[in-house]
């Protein structure tokens, strides 16, 4: 019979084989890439709640666009590269929207005395948990505030 | 203590966090999502965390807490490692000769209670000590030892059954 230490060593080796480092796709995978993996099954309650969040995000964008007086679509100096790229192409974002990118963008915006407002309060919406929502990203830049949201396209 | 820049830490440890999330949830994509959110939360507390000089246990703790929240919400069934996607994922990245072992170990993990699964993953995948595991899980070292012992007994049994099956097939 295998000794306890044998089992622990075997378990450790087997776990490292089952879950090798770098097994997961990199966190910086773009949204388009992850979307191609298809939808995930979700409960209807969750889908409804996500829908509500999507509508709320849309309202945030509309409200900010109205209250800002003007929609200056030119990015502020020093805006994160992906935001500049998105604004310049006007197309759907295919850039990294991972936690690190969001954190870096927030950090850079703060260093510039600007504020990066995410669609959700804590930025958690910018993950692939929401990938089943058809991709539509709106970024409005106005008076140094970058507003970003993802919602279901009509 | 010299503070490590957040970007550097994230670059070094994002894969490790994603792997931890994958092992806990049994789903590579959810593991990545947990890692992303853990990184974001870590960044918000980075000034304070980096002062200590070793942010990894704190990052792992955030991920474990995220995992607990995820389980509470029940976004997924608890069939860790038994989904089609999980098995495909194992085949895609695991050398052929290790597939049986990888699937077996995933099955073993799936059968463990969540706390036991977390202890096993932290102790034997992340190679954390009993004290470090206790810190990450927010429990006592005694509890880690107890959960570990129970989990190892179940795994030992599963390994023995698997070997018995192989022997029977050969005979």
Image (spheres, helix red, strand yellow):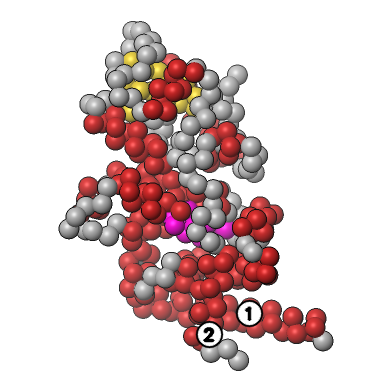
- Residue A118: quarter of image: top left
Name the residue: 62% across, 67% down: B102
Q: Main secondary structure of the magenta part?
A: helix
Whether B23 is among the magenta residues is yes
Q: Give me the disc on residue B159.
A: 1
Can residue B93 be seen by looking at this rendering?
A: yes
Provide the secondary structure element on which disc 1 rests.
Answer: helix
Pointer 2 indicates a residue of which chain? A
The x, y position of residue A58, in whole percent, is 47, 22
Residue occupied by mark 2: A6
Q: Which residues are magenta?
A: B16-26
Residue A146: give x, y in percent of width and height. Answer: 35, 23
Q: Is residue A100 above or below residue B67?
A: above
Residues beneath discs 1 and 2 located on the same chain: no
Could you tell me residue B93's position as x and y percent?
A: 61, 58
Quadrant in which residue B161 is drawn? bottom right
Relative height, residue A7 to residue A126 (above, below): below
The reply, left or right, for residue B170 in relation to residue A124 is right
Which residue is at 80% across, 83% downward?
B170
């Amino acid at each position: 019979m295998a000794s306890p230490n044998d089992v622990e060593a075997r378990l450790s080796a087997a776990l490292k084989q089952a879950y090798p480092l770098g097994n997961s796709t990199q966190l910086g995978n773009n949204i388009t890439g992850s979307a191609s993996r298809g939808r995930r099954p979700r409960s209807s309650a969750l889908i409804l709640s996500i829908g509500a969040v999507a509508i709320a995000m849309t309202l945030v964008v509309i409200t900010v666009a109205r209250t800002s007086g003007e929609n200056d679509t030119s990015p502020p100096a020093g805006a994160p590269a992906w935001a500049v790229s998105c604004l310049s192409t006007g197309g759907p974002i295919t850039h990294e929207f991972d936690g690190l990118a969001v954190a870096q963008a927030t950090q850079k915006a703060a260093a510039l005395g600007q504020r990066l407002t995410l669609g959700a309060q804590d930025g958690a919406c910018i993950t692939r948990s929401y990938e089943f929502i058809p991709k539509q990203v709106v970024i409005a830049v106005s008076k140094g505030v970058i507003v970003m949201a993802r919602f279901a396209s009509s | 203590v010299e503070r490590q820049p957040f970007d550097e830490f994230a670059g070094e440890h994002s894969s490790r966090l994603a792997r931890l999330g994958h092992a806990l949830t049994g789903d590579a994509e959810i593991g990545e999502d947990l890692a992303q959110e853990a990184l974001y939360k870590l960044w918000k507390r980075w000034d304070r965390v980096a002062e200590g000089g070793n942010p990894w246990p704190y990052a792992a703790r955030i991920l474990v807490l995220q995992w607990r929240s995820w389980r509470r919400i029940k976004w997924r069934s608890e069939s860790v490692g038994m989904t089609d996607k999980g098995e495909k994922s194992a085949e895609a990245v695991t050398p052929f000769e290790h597939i049986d072992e990888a699937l077996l170990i995933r099955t073993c993990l799936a059968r463990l209670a969540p706390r036991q699964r977390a202890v096993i993953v932290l102790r034997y995948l992340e190679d954390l000590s009993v004290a470090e595991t206790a810190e990450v899980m927010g429990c006592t070292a005694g509890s880690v030892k107890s959960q570990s012992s129970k989990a190892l007994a179940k795994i030992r049994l599963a390994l023995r059954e698997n070997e018995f099956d192989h022997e029977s097939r050969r005979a």
